Image: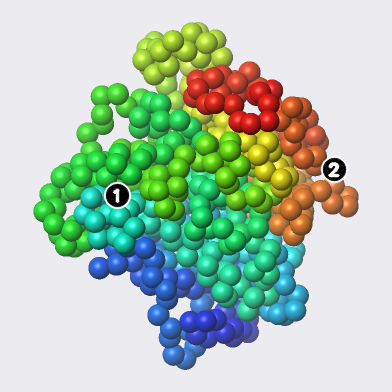
Amino acid sequence: MHDLMAPVIVHTEAGWLEGERLADGDVIRFLGVPYAQPPVGGLRWRPPQPTTPWNGIRPALEFGPSAPQPPVSKRSMLSVDLTRQDEDCLYLNVWTGGLDLSERRPVIVWLHYGGFILGGAADPRFNGEMLAREGAVVVTLNYRLGRLGYLAHPWLSAESTDRTSGNFGLLDQVAALEWVQQDIAAFGGDPGCVTLMGLSAGAASTSMLMTSPLAAGLFHRAVGMSGGIFGSRRPPGVGDSLESLDEAEAAGERVVAALGARTLEDLRRLDATRVNETRLPAPPEAPKLVFAALGEAIPGPGTGAHPTIDGRLIPGDPYDAFANGRQIDVPVMTGSAGDECTGMPYFESADEFVQAAQALYGQDAAEFLQLFPAGSDAETKDSSARAMADRIFVWQNWTWARLHSRSAHSPTFYYHTSYAPPVPSDRGYLESEPGAFHTTEAFYVFGGMRTKDWPWTHKDEALSKTMRRFWLNFAASGDPSGPGLPEWPRFDPTDPVAMHFGGEVRRGPVPRREHLHFWDRYFGRPQPAGGQTP
């Protein structure tokens, strides 16, 4: 990181902020900017409330606390030190290359990953300095996580004017986008050119907000990296789909019973860690499909820690919205990495994997095991990780591209990342080479290599530069192509092509099509208007 120098003062609707300019003078940053009131006490499990204005100049010199969350295994590729955590977490950060109000730079709003239970805007791998240095205004934000962010319950719905509950973390994201519309011009950003960009749960959030009437007009491009929410609710307990409000309230009642709270006031007084981490008995039908990287925390429907089709923020099934052209019609860039579930759980026993596949996939199990064979324990590890990757990540982005390209007027662009970062073999992350692991593409888009003391080479730097140019072009114009770059064609569902980021950057066929078609058939999704699945 660069040294810091002179303070910089900016006026927002809530008051004056003091940021700081990096020593080379090219980037100014403002950290820990409140975009809503602290969601504590009586505001726990309520929609975010407008920030209370302050007098004088408020320092914006350090990150705000991340939302409370469980620990992550140090062996996980996703492990990062976010030790400063607090329920008072609704803060954002801004990086900009200048405060000229007439310049109006494109704005990128970043939603972090973490299965809706982990992560934060202080993650050093995804700070906005490099993108700001090259022309964008970058906003990163915390939002409520776990049960503090997504618990639905009849008590909470009854006190709501809309008779809904849950989705508080998504409402936080909407509030941050509203803050951008109100205040980003003071930081040199264009409120009419906002790209909503997320990874994993952040990508899933982006896909959901594209279907939300509350988010309409708040962003003008969307980037979804390695994630989305397009699965059907089969089987229960998998984080690739959404619950109805009734189902989420029933899960919330199980949570409240486990916590022993007798009233809503009791519930609001409970310790945040206890609320988030109290375990529920796994339902007997729940599949063995969990993220080992998350330790004891299991995200997904039925836990009180997952988004909900609430009829207001999320009016209905996102798949149906996209299939029928009811999504927000903005340019979309989406894709995934080739080894998404490296470092995540896998089955070690071939027999156990086969038994689980038969129980989970029923009449589709034979086809599943042809595509994901388990001829040995070693093959089982690879197949189980690939099956998880396809289902939770790759198929989501494929489906996002397929649906949006058919039903929207705005263009869609699809990518596949296969380039493997140089993860040292002695760091204890994995038993095998990690490949293009989950978060790889964002690592390069943000230029986050400097946050890891790995043996980076000029190839890594070159790939990072190329990906940043594509992403910045898209943020500025809605089209990633530009001078000096390979032409990135619009996604055509009748002849799908991806931009491949591997040993070289090139256009090519979408990989693993047979596997993707299996998930199309398994989920039993009706075909969208405009033709059959290619």
Res 7 → quadrant: bottom right
Name the one closer to the observer, 164 or 128. Answer: 164
Q: Looking at the rendering, in which quadrant would you find the N terminus? A: bottom right
- Which is nearer the N-term, disc 1 or disc 2? 1
Camera-side mark, 1 or 2: 1
- Circle 2: residue type: Pro
Residue under pointer 1: 152
Pointer 1 local density, CA inside 10 Å: few below 14, some 14–19, many at least 20: many
> Is 77 rendered above or below residue 168?
above
Q: Tell me, yes or no, whether the two marked residues, 1 and 2, touch with CB atoms within 8 Å.
A: no
Relative image position of residue 475 (x, y in whole percent): 71, 57
Name the one closer to the observer, 509 or 504. Answer: 509
Residue at the right extreme, as displayed: 484
Which disc, if any, is residue 252?
Answer: none
Residue under pointer 2: 486
Pointer 2 local density, CA inside 10 Å: few below 14, some 14–19, many at least 20: some
> Is 102 rendered above or below residue 363?
below
Colour mapping: rainbow
Q: Name the residue located 11 percent from the left edge and 53 percent from the top edge.
A: 262
> At numbered mark 1, what does the secondary structure look like: helix, strand or loop?
loop
Relative image position of residue 354 (x, y in whole percent): 42, 12
Q: Name the residue located 21 percent from the left edge and 54 percent from the top edge.
A: 155
Instruction: Residue 204: tell me if it is visible.
Output: yes
Relative image position of residue 282 (x, y in whole percent): 26, 31
Instruction: Residue 434: tell me if it is visible.
Output: no
Res 520 → quadrant: top right
Name the one closer to the observer, 305 or 419. Answer: 305
